[in-house]
Amino acid sequence: MKISYNWLNQFLDLKTSVSETSDILTATGLEVEGIDHYESIRGGLKGLLLGEVLTCEKHPNADKLSLTTVDIGLDVHSRIVCGAPNVAKGQKVIVAPIGSTIYPSDKEEGFTLSKAKIRGEVSEGMICSAYEIGMSKDHSGIIVVDTSEPNGSPAINLFDLESDSVFEIGLTPNRADAMSHIGVCRDIKAVNGQEVNWPLIESFQVENHDCPIDVVVEDSNGAPRYSGVTISNLQIKESPNWLKNRLTSIGLTPINNVVDITNYVLHSLGQPLHAFDYDEIIGKKVVVKTLPVGSKFTTLDEKERELTSSDLMICNEKEGMCIAGVFGGIKSGIKESTKNIFLESAYFAPEYIRKTSLTHGLKTDASFRYERGTDPNLTVFALKWASILIGELANGKVSSEIIDINPNPVNDFIVPVSFKNIDRLIGKPIGEKLILEILESLDIKISDKTDIGFTATVPPYRVDVQREADVIEEILRIYGYDNVELSDTLRTDFLSDFPQQNKDDLQITIGELLVSNGFYEIITNSLTKPKYSEGIATIESKEDVEILNKLSEDLGVMRQSLLPNGLEVITHNVNRRQKNLKLFEFGKTYKSSKNKYKEEEILAIFLTGNKHVENWIEEEKDVGFHDLSKYVFSCLSRLGIVGYKSEVIENDIWSSAIQLTYNEQVIGTFGWVNQRVIKLVEVSQSVLYAELFWGRLLKKSFQHVVYKEVPKFPEVRRDLSLVIDKQVTFSEIKQLTEKVERKLLKQVNVFSIYEGENIGKDKKAYAISFILQDENQTLKDKQIDNVMNRLISAFEKDLSALIRK
């Protein structure tokens, strides 16, 4: 962000040099990354002199050239060949003598004059036009000066030139308040104790009511405050030099007086303005709203854009005129023929502008500020000042009352602060008096002061100061980081604690994980049919929580399991030809035991139907056990739960299932739902079901997070083929493997299973891979063989395994 030193001086009587001001800005957090020198005329006319044409004759060898003698002072008469048609004897002119450098308006680089021969005649310099010295693009003739200054006077004395120093500030995203010259002045004021000279707006007045306008804000969420005024009978023309210098110093190109004034106010106050051609506003009505998705709108760059549902628009009675806070439209912009305008000053919601700016790839000075947060209390002030300037520079007349729609004013931020935390976070006590002085200098009001602390009332333009730590940071940056001495023993401090995992956040995380894998969340009734607990032995009917004032017998008890109600959802969908289902539900189960009630939080996951939607690439295939296990293990992994054990079970709920335990406590079960339960709920197809004890998982999630350096040494893979009894599970093999070798074993995996007559009726063969790695050195063959021999011995002894070699 570019900030002009002269511009700052306009609002603050700076007592510091450019270098000192730079140091102050950097110390307060507005880091100055560089300082550029600006000149309203490049080169500052250095070396150029005032001269007088003593003689002017036709060039002997060229019809369009003149041969002149020019007095440039100190009795020096230079012979100069000149091509300007208006050169004449007796004129006072600007001369670039030999050795001087000029910077033409359309050239990036300047060039230095040297003695030359033009059509056979010596030329000792140049009589300059406005184009040749960078004053304008007019090169129709030389500059003729009316002055009593003596010949040889520096040309710089004849013009009101401006030189400036421009700070390049590396603005951090949180400092929305400093995106203007006034904003930067606030920080300097807090350090130096000076008052900011705000523009005077007392002269603002409504001069007529010739341009009435009706304003309607339909989307007050996107435009919490919308202000505007009409101005008539203005004259669009070139801006005066002082205004053009202000804008060009920070890299902006002047356009015309009205547009330049809106840019000037923007960079002065940080409040974007937009001027509409009043005569182009259909129905003389301004409506702030969103348009239907897919609506077409052509912006100032002549590109047609397709609008989204969140693009806030400034419309007239029939169509859009401007993408609010981002970019204007091609029809309603200011033209040379514009006579009347509607001037807009608004506070738009940052999230609206940010989304629109990203969607359409439009980055403007206005969107840059709106998407970070502007001052909602500055809209009317900016309007009045801009109206006064338009009156002065364009002869415009204010032709309506100011319209200010502000149904829900943005409140100040109220922040309790303790003196103890200020001293603790800064690292040293700096005194209550200084603390309060600093905050008041930053426009932060103090109330409810006690010996312990106070309440800080922060203005809404400080969007980054909403917590106690933020207020303390404000105190520290004005007090000065360099003023806090380093202690002999360095340490750090903080104001935050380490709260428990937020179960709502974790629930959203797991929900999003499942949804991203094609699941739909369901919410079923906590009341259910008594016949389910009566028909499923594992769900004991005597533990039902009965409803005393039941609405019907079908909903007479509270559910002990999420399974039956979930199966009802599946039945409902299957009956409507939706057979491929992936569902999940977070819910509670309820039990009554010994006159006590028990609630349990459950995550239920259902899978049924085909694995893939019908298509020509893949054959239809039913979901399988491992499809469900993949999702269950993904959830556990996302919660950071490791080290659980598994065993195969079956009961009257599951015909085949895996039960997971952690430290001897069951955390979940998943597998095929028993056909008896399927028939009880009248489901017409097989269902996979997982029941995870959500409350228990939350207590175990992310308990031990350990970060380790990535190993530098390679891993080694060895494979074994084991022939074992059919009842031996991979879980048993894995547990035995981890028991035998803990240090070097990193991974165990089954990559092939075989069953057949060749190995025996009650046997199966597992092909298993073992990944070994030493994190401190490269493994040697002897170490690897030793580990594998111990594993083979354990398999043969404990599992009666036959090792196939």
Image (cartoon, rainbow, N blue to C red):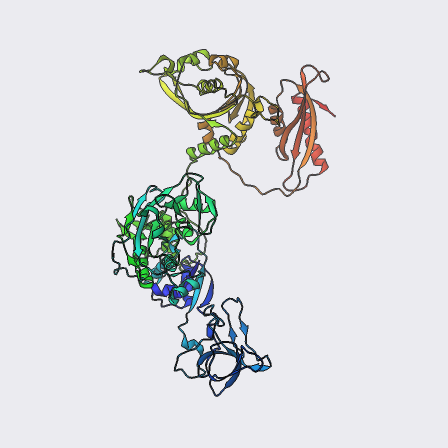
Residue found at the far right of this picture: 805
Quarter of the image with the C terminus in it = top right
Q: Position of residue 313 (x, y in %)?
A: 39, 45
Residue 682 in sight from this viewpoint: yes
Q: Give residue 606's position: percent from left, percent from top.
A: 50, 23
The quadrant of the rendering that contains the N terminus is bottom left
Toward the viewer: 662 or 628?
Answer: 628
Q: Position of residue 584 (x, y in %)?
A: 47, 26
Q: Is residue 423 visible?
A: no
Give 309 or 757, whichever is nearer the viewer. Answer: 309
**Rendered location of residue 352, percent (x, y):** 40, 44
How many marks do you count on the picture?
0
Q: Is residue 373 left or right of residue 785?
A: left
Vertical position of residue 435 compared to residue 15: above or below: above
Please report the residue visible at 41 percent of the width from the left and 43 percent of the height from the top. 311
Is residue 34 placed above or below 325 in the rendered structure?
below
The structure residue drawn at horizontal position 47% and vertical position 50%, both measured from the top left corner, is: 302
Q: Residue 529 falls in which quadrant of the image?
A: top left
Residue at the image position 47 percent from the left and 46 percent from the top: 304
Could you say which is closer to the camera, residue 453 or residue 256? 256
In the drawing, does residue 62 fall left or right of residue 569? Answer: right
Horizontal side of 281 relative to 801 (left or right) equals: left
